Image (cartoon, rainbow, N blue to C red):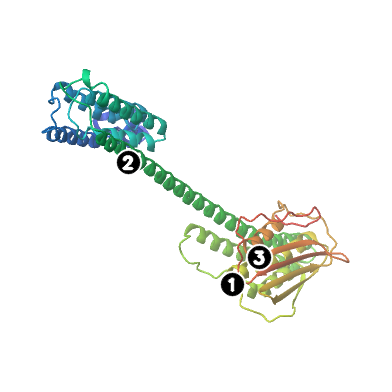
Amino acid sequence: MDEQRAHGSTGPRRGPGGYGPPGRLRGLRLRDGDRLPWLSTVVLGVVVMAGTTVAAHGQGREPLGAVARLLLTVAVAVLLVRHRHPVAAVAGTSAATLAYLALGYPYGPVLLAVAVGCVSAIVSGHRKAAWWSLGALWAGHVLVSHWLYRWLPPEGDGPAPWGQEAFITAWVVAIVAAAELLRVRREQWAAARAEREAAERRRADEERLRMARELHDVLAHSISVINVQAGVGLALLDADPEQARTALTTIKSASKEALGEVRQVLENLRTPGDAPRAPAPGLDRLPELVDQAADAGLTVTVEPEDGTRRAVPPGTDLAAFRIVQEALTNVVRHSGSRTAEVRIAYGDGRIRLRVDDEGPATGRDAGGSGNGLIGMRERAAALGGTIDAGPRPGGGFRVTAELPLRPGPGGPDAPPDGAGPEAKETP
């Protein structure tokens, strides 16, 4: 005890009465398979006993004695295990009911117990057991009512009218039909629930993929600029301190911008139901990309092609910006060219992007894993657009993209096109 107090603990918590942890007791009580349907079974037993007593008047059958009460009790009591053992429950209640009717006792609500057992068995998937139990009860009743009645109580009883058999047959068919309908509806509800859960998981996966793409695009571009400027700063630290200072200033600016965009993405991740506090980047921020590329030693020319500039939906605008950003990052990392050209064209309900550099490829790598081109294709596919990346005629590299101004049926999980071995990628 002293050792427990020294560590700030007074031993394991115990539930009511001091027997074990309360969480375990609650789990045992709440599991459906461990609970017995006491309340519904007791209510059914009261209905069967009272209803049979009332229905016995005027039937001219055997009086309700101890044996009759015992059989009624057994027919209802076996239903306590209908959740754990539905086959035994339906078979037991059917057998007890058949014995009750064969001994000439009055008709009454005992058939409700058979109905409850049959429904429980069919809903739980034991359809054949329920059918066989009901079939045996029906066949046994026909046999008793029309052939064995001479040797069974009550004395002087005659054969049952066939109209009564027709009623019992209709009752059996109604029970089976109602149980099958309930089973089908439960299966439909379960399928709909599983579909909703799958859709929720799919949406969560798509959201994680979108966040991963955003973080990749933000970090890949900024870290590329930082990597280049850090190399410049180290090379000129002694020979040209002023130029090294400029490189460090660029690193500070790029890292600050990257931190701001990462913070925005993480805020959206933490509060998915809230509106973003800052607008998502779009093509109106291309001048910032040009300035950042210039800080990394890359001269970028932006030239609009034919077509009037149109309003671009936010999702398409963000995708277009990220694709251009990723393409310029590729040039900074993997191309020996210090110039790049960006062309933007509007027409036919689509926006067309083209990013060219003169090459050649340098084979440099800044520690990435090669997911940049995959991310660009995923962005385009999510909007119903296309991406084409590869060597261009006359040397160099070209990235072209076509994005619809109105998103198509493609989803974030649309399979991206495979990239050729010559394609240049960023992490």
Q: Toward which corner of the image does residue 67 lie, by quadrant? A: top left
Near-viewer residue (140 or 71): 140
The residue at 33%/34% (across/down) is: 118
Near-viewer residue (129 or 167): 167
Residue 84 visible? The answer is no
Near-viewer residue (313 or 373): 313
Which mark is nearer the camera, 2 or 1?
2
Q: Toward which corner of the image does residue 339 lie, by quadrant? A: bottom right
Q: Which residue is mark 1?
A: 313
Q: Earlier in the sequence, mark 2 or mark 1?
A: 2
Q: Position of residue 129 (x, y in %)?
A: 39, 29
Q: Position of residue 369 (x, y in %)?
A: 71, 51
Q: Position of residue 60 (x, y in %)?
A: 13, 29
Near-viewer residue (213 or 287): 213
Q: Toward which corner of the image does residue 44 lie, by quadrant? A: top left
Crowd class of label 2 (few under 14; some 14 to 19; many from 20; radius 10 Å): few
Q: Which residue is mark 2?
A: 174
Which mark is nearer the camera, 3 or 2?
2
The residue most toward the top is: 151
Callout 3 amino acid: Arg
Q: Which residue is mark 3?
A: 322
- Apparent side of residue 284 relative to residue 156 in the rendered image (left or right): right
Q: Earlier in the sequence, mark 3 or mark 2?
A: 2
Element class at badge 1: loop
Which mark is nearer the camera, 1 or 3?
1
